[in-house]
Image (cartoon, rainbow, N blue to C red):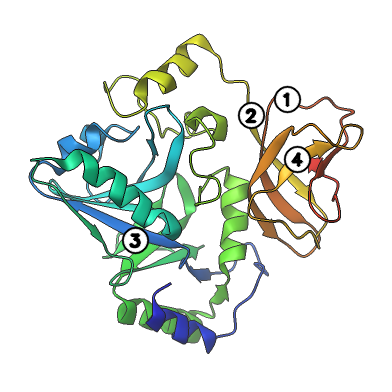
């Protein structure tokens, strides 16, 4: 997390849940970082590394994508923003920035491409129910009409938070609350614990428009394409819930009450709400209606598919 923003947030009142679905809310998305890719070869370089079609990007219009290893496993999901023809911002989990930067750097070779971690110089705010009206530094949040991103230097972001709270009665919400919105929207964010566990289709990135099947070769493309055209994806990502008091380890396997020795899937993301904990889970196959799914955590919390 940006240390200056961290100090600022410690002095604020932050809600773990959204009190009103129609009210203005904002969150400092300090769990995310920004990796800038710049240079005259940046677009061509990214076209050969990522799952989305870089040539189809429009300036300042975010696109969901995936960066995979050679076996087609997703190293990181991300949001990419084309700033200019030669500058792109990848937004991804902060704990994967160094890993992704190191792996991408291996392929730069003699290309005119520079990779820069801008997580300390730029902050990301998420806004819910904010009417941005094409203002500077505001970006639509993928295909969601009621959410957007604000990306700027730390002082500017802090000022916006203060102004929204003071003048527009905005609620400052936690990362947990914002994550709940992502889970409900089906947007998967991988971190260092879940990196390289899933082919993109296992976390529904194909259904979210994050994969182009016409763009040509990129790292992992052969496996991703074969999974698509042969229909061999045997895993499914689902929305679920469990007890509001559930405590999950970094990687939490999912088992059946009648067979605790067999791992049926894993939790991708979670968000504690007032009445329940929302879960984003990946299972090996569509569960039977009678399956008694539970977390393989200390309390073996029961899971309900929503």
Q: Which label sits on residue 236? A: 2
Q: Earlier in the sequence, mark 3 or mark 1?
A: 3
Look at mark 1 in the image and give the residue it sits on.
286
- 193 to the left or right of 134: right
Q: Which label sits on residue 133? A: 3
- 179 to the left or right of 84: right
Q: Please state which of the two labelled residues, at mark 3 or mark 2, is closer to the viewer.
A: 2
Q: CA distance from mark 3 to mark 2?
A: 37 Å
Q: Quadrant of residue 282?
A: top right
Q: Earlier in the sequence, mark 2 or mark 1?
A: 2
Q: CA distance from mark 3 to mark 1?
A: 42 Å
Q: Tell me, yes or no, whether the two marked residues, 2 and 1, touch with CB atoms within 8 Å.
A: yes
Q: Secondary structure at mark 3?
A: loop
Q: Tell me, yes or no, whether the two marked residues, 1 and 4, touch with CB atoms within 8 Å.
A: no
Disc 1: CA contacts within 10 A as few (<14), some (14-19) or many (>=20): few
Q: Please state which of the two labelled residues, at mark 4 or mark 3, is closer to the viewer.
A: 4
- 302 to the left or right of 60: right
Q: Residue at x 48, y 38 (%)?
A: 196
Q: Earlier in the sequence, mark 2 or mark 4?
A: 2
The x, y position of residue 262, in whole percent, is: 79, 31
């Amino acid at each position: 997390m940006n240390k200056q923003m961290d100090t600022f947030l410690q002095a604020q009142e932050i809600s773990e849940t959204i009190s009103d679905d129609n009210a203005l809310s904002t969150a400092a998305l300090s769990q995310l970082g920004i990796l800038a890719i710049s240079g005259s070869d940046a677009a061509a370089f990214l076209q050969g590394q990522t799952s989305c079609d870089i040539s189809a990007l429009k300036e300042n219009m975010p696109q969901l994508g995936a960066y995979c290893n050679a076996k087609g496993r997703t190293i990181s999901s991300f949001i990419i923003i084309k700033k200019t023809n030669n500058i792109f911002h990848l937004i991804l989990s902060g704990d994967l920035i160094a890993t992704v930067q190191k792996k991408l750097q291996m392929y730069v070779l003699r290309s005119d491409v520079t990779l820069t971690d801008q997580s300390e110089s730029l902050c990301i705010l998420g806004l819910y129910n904010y009417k941005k009206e094409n203002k500077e530094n505001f970006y639509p949040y993928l295909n969601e009409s009621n959410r957007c991103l604000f990306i700027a230097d730390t002082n500017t972001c802090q000022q916006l938070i203060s102004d929204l709270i003071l003048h527009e009665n905005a609620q400052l919400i936690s990362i947990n609350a914002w994550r709940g919105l992502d889970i409900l929207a089906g947007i998967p964010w991988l971190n260092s614990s879940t990196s390289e566990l899933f082919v993109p289709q296992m976390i529904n990135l194909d259904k979210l428009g994050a994969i182009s099947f016409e763009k040509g070769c990129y790292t992992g493309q052969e496996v991703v394409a074969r999974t698509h055209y042969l229909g061999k994806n045997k895993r499914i990502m689902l929305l679920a819930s469990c007890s509001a008091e559930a405590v999950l380890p970094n990687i939490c396997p999912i088992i059946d009450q009648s067979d605790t020795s067999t791992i049926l899937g894993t939790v991708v993301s979670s968000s504690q709400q007032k009445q329940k904990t929302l879960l984003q889970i990946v299972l090996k196959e569509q569960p039977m209606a009678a399956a008694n799914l539970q977390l393989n955590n200390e309390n073996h919390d029961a899971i309900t598919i929503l």
